[in-house]
Image (cartoon, grey):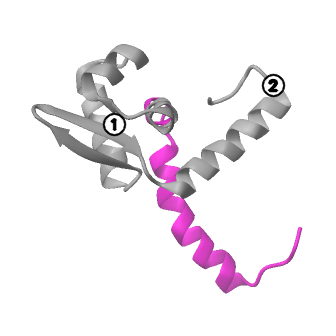
Amino acid sequence: METMDIKTVRSMAIRLVPLLKALANEDRILLLTHLAKEECDVMQLGEILQIKQPTLSQQLGVVRRSGLVATRREGKHIYYRTVNAEALAVMGQISALYRKTHGKKAALS
């Protein structure tokens, strides 16, 4: 592994900590993984991911405030989609690492 100076590491850590905090929840990982594949509204997400409404709303609020998802309104429906490339890259790396250590079927996709 290459050596980095402390300023570079600190700068990286400052950017990484909020992202990792936003990802540090089972429901948020499920949401982001699904939204990386397709845009969905709240009802679809609740049905597909089996997350109850109060929890779903709370976790969508967290990922929205963290800048990990974007929304668009169509009538009464609000659609969500994953938009943060860094979050997708981190989740992809975690998925690859998990697959490597736990078998090919164990993935976030």
Q: Which mark is residue 102?
A: 2
Q: Residue furthest left?
A: 76
Q: Residues within 10 Å of mark 1 (few under 14, many from 20)?
A: many
Note whether 50 is above or below 82 in the view shown.
Answer: above
The answer to which quarter of the image holds residue 61 is: top left
Q: Residue at x 45, y 48 (%)?
A: 22
Q: Which mark is residue 59?
A: 1
The amino acid sitting under disc 1 is Gln
Q: Position of residue 73 (x, y in %)?
A: 18, 41
Task: Locate residue 47 relative to residue 26 in the image: left or right.
Answer: left
In magenta, the rendered stretch is 1-29
Note whether 12 is above or below 42 in the view shown.
Answer: below
- Real-space Cα separation, disc 2 to disc 1, in angstroms: 27 Å
Task: Locate residue 42 relative to residue 77 in the image: left or right.
Answer: right
The amino acid sitting under disc 2 is His
Secondary element under disc 1, as helix, strand or loop, is helix
Q: Residue furthest front?
A: 74
Q: Is residue 16 magenta?
A: yes
Q: Residue at x 47, y 59 (%)?
A: 18
Q: Residue at x 53, y 56 (%)?
A: 85
| Along the line of sight, the residue nearer the viewer: 84 or 21 | 84
